[in-house]
Amino acid sequence: AKEKEEELKKYRQQENLIAREIINLTKKEQQTEKLSVKLVGDIEVIQSQRTKTIEHKTLLEENLPMWQGIVRGELSGYIIQNSLKSKYYDSDEEKSLAIFSAALQNHMLFVQKLKSETKETSQKIESFKEKSKELEAKKEKLETQKEAIKDSYKKKQEDLQNTHRRNE
């Protein structure tokens, strides 16, 4: 009788241990689910930012040739106008050339800015791509963890049922 009582006590301790493990597994599963939901949200944000950045880059690339053409045209006009000026040009001609030169410089700076922004945008797109890959890898890892937790949970449930049967 004493052996049965000790065995019963042992099974109850196992049962309590397994029950606590099941509770811990349930908590872990909830935590991984929350992380998974957050990761999905982060992935969506990154992909949205990447899409917007790609659209921005496309606009820059579409407008850059037009502005380069404008600068080439202005530069040609400036060269022609500068070469046609007389030795004895007046202050109006001088003002005109100065204004033309300033406009040309502004447009050249604008084209450089477009090129620079296009390059930065390309780098941003790559950065978003890498971040997205990282998040996807984390998501896959979490999914694997969730599956392992579910398997452990099922095993513990079976162990608990087996312990109940032994108690009976």
Image (tube, grey):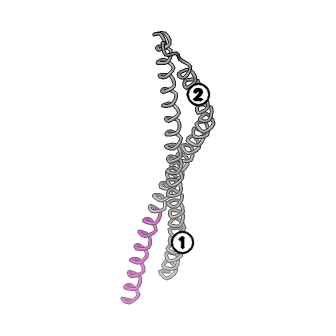
Residue where numbered disc 1 is placed: 151
Q: How many marks?
A: 2
Toward the front, the furthest residue is: 87
Q: Which residues are magenta?
A: 1-26
Q: Secondary structure at mark 1?
A: helix
Binning the other alpha carbons within 10 Å of mark 1 as few (below 14), some (14 to 19) or many (20 upward) gives few
Q: Position of residue 20 (x, y in %)?
A: 41, 68
Query: Which one is nearer the viewer's eye here, 93 or 49?
Result: 93
* Distance from the alpha carbon under mark 1 to that under mark 2: 75 Å
Residue 117 is one of the magenta-drawn residues = no
Q: Which residue is identified by label 2?
A: 76
Q: Amino acid at mark 1?
A: Asp
| Location of residue 19 in the rendering, given as x and y in whole percent from the top left corner | 44, 70
Residue 7 position by quadrant:
bottom left
The one nearer the camera, 89 or 38, is: 89
In the image, what residue type sits under mark 2? Answer: Ser
Q: Disc 1 or disc 2, which is closer to the eye?
A: 2
Q: Position of residue 70 (x, y in %)?
A: 60, 28
Residue at 58% from the left image edge and 27% from the top image edge? 76
Image position of 70 with respect to 89: above or below: below
